[in-house]
Amino acid sequence: NAGVTQTPKFQVLKTGQSMTLQCAQDMNHNSMYWYRQDPGMGLRLIYYSASEGTTDKGEVPNGYNVSRLNKREFSLRLESAAPSQTSVYFCASKLAGEVAEQYFGPGTRLTVT
Amino acid sequence: AQSVAQPEDQVNVAEGNPLTVKCTYSVSGNPYLFWYVQYPNRGLQFLLKYITGDNLVKGSYGFEAEFNKSQTSFHLKKPSALVSDSALYFCAVRDRIGSSNTGKLIFGQGTTLQVKP
C-alpha cells in the first residue's frame, strides 16, 4: 500500500515550457486535491476533484489545468510555466464524507527559471 | 468565510518541557478542525481532528489538542517534547459554503516547532 505517490520529485523548467505533474493513490479514495506550498503562506488549493469525473477550481487555479483520469489518478498541468509557479506541489486524497482526513503525497519541488 | 490563524511563526521549547502550538479559527456552523505535521522534505501527515464530543482530542505521537468554543481555539499540545518533534505544524478547518460541504480544507500558515536538547 503505497498511499499517495507523486512524480516527479524535482523538476526545473524554463519560462514558457509545459509539464504535467502526476499523482496516484491506492486507497480507493473518492476525492483528490492539488496544493501548492510557498514559504509563509501555508498550503493553497489549486484544484480539486470531489469524485471521479468532476473537477473544481480552488483558491489559486490560474495557470493550471487538471485531469481526473480515473479514480486513482489526478494530474496537474502547467501549460506555460512562469517563475511565479516556482513552488512545492502536493497532491492529497481522502474518502468521501466531510469528516475524513486528507492523506498527502511526498511533493514535487518545481523551479521555473 | 472560514479562516484559521496560527499566531506564532516559530515556537521554541526545551526537550522534556510541555509544548503548545496555537490555532484560532473563524467558521460558520460547527467547526471541523485538523492538525497536520510536516517533517523536512516530506508531505503532510495527519495528527488528529476534532469533529464533535470531548473537547480534548488525542492523536498520533503523543499529541493532543484542546477545542475551546468560547475562545474559538484549537491548540496543539504535548506534555513532554522530544527533539524529534521538531517540524512544521499546520492547523486546518473544513471549508463550507452555506450548508454545503466542499470537502476542502483551509490551512493556517504553519508554525515551526524547534525542540532543543
Image (cartoon, coloured by chain):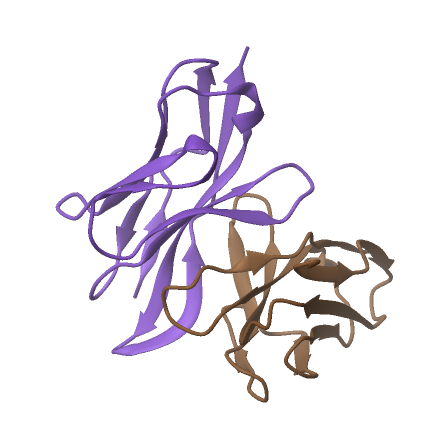
Q: Residue furthest top?
A: B117
Residue A60: % across, % down: 55, 68
**Residue B58, how many percent across, how many down?**
34, 40
**The quadrant where residue A112 appears:** bottom right
The structure residue drawn at horizontal position 39% and vertical position 14%, both measured from the top left corner, is B17
Q: Position of residue A108 (x, y in %)?
A: 74, 55
Q: Is A45 rendered above or below residue B85? A: below
Position of the C terminus of chain B, as image quadrant, is top right
In the image, taking residue A42 as reference, residue B56 lies left or right, namely left
Drawn side of residue B9 relative to residue B84, left or right: left
Q: Nearer the viewer, residue B15 or A111?
A: B15
Q: Residue at x 43, y 13 (%)?
A: B16
Is B107 positioned to the left or the right of A28 in the image? left
Chain A palette colour: brown
Chain B visual colour:
purple
Residue at (39% x, 51% y) in the render: B34
Residue B9 percent across, percent down from the top left: 45, 33
